[in-house]
Image (cartoon, rainbow, N blue to C red):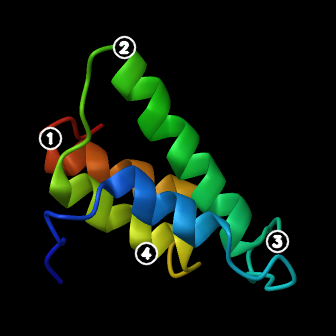
Amino acid sequence: MLLDPDVSHSFRITALSETNEDEVVNSTQAITAAERARHIGQAIHNSNMEGMEASQQAILETYDYISGEINAETLVARVRALHGLER
């Protein structure tokens, strides 16, 4: 999946965070896709405020987290590996 360069990532995350609040994702601690999208949006915003920018590859990984396909621990591991920061 390629990202549309004409659509900002923060716009995509915001749009995802405004999805159906009743949709619950099965996980150890069930949260909605909207809550997951909000968490990602906040993390990206915090990084931007610190002068960092999330790579397209890292943002693509967040889509699996938002949809509930992976948990936060897996997301962190994938992004760390992407940037050569494996544990």
Residue indicated by mark 1: 83
Q: Amino acid at mark 1?
A: His
Residue indicated by mark 4: 64
Q: Which of disc 1 and disc 2 is earlier in sequence?
A: 2
Q: Quadrant of the C terminus?
A: top left
Question: Residue 5's spot in the image, x, y percent?
Answer: 13, 63
Q: Residue at x 82, y 76 (%)?
A: 21
Q: Residue at x 52, y 47 (%)?
A: 41
Image marks 3 and 2: residues in contact by CB distance under 8 Å: no
Q: Which quadrant would residue 14 be assigned to in this image?
A: bottom right
Residue indicated by mark 3: 30
Q: Amino acid at mark 3?
A: Ala
Q: CA distance from mark 4 to mark 2?
A: 25 Å
Q: Which of disc 2 and disc 3 is earlier in sequence?
A: 3
Q: Quadrant of the N terminus?
A: bottom left
On the picture, is 69 further left or further right than 29?
left
Question: Residue 42's spot in the image, x, y percent?
Answer: 57, 38
Image marks 2 and 1: residues in contact by CB distance under 8 Å: no
- Residue 46 tag number: none
Q: Which quadrant would residue 59 be assigned to in this image?
A: bottom left
**One can see residue 2 in this view:** yes
Which-is-in-front pick, marks 2 and 1? Answer: 2
Q: Which of disc 1 and disc 3 is earlier in sequence?
A: 3
Q: Amino acid at mark 2?
A: Glu
Question: Residue 55's spot in the image, x, y percent?
Answer: 18, 46
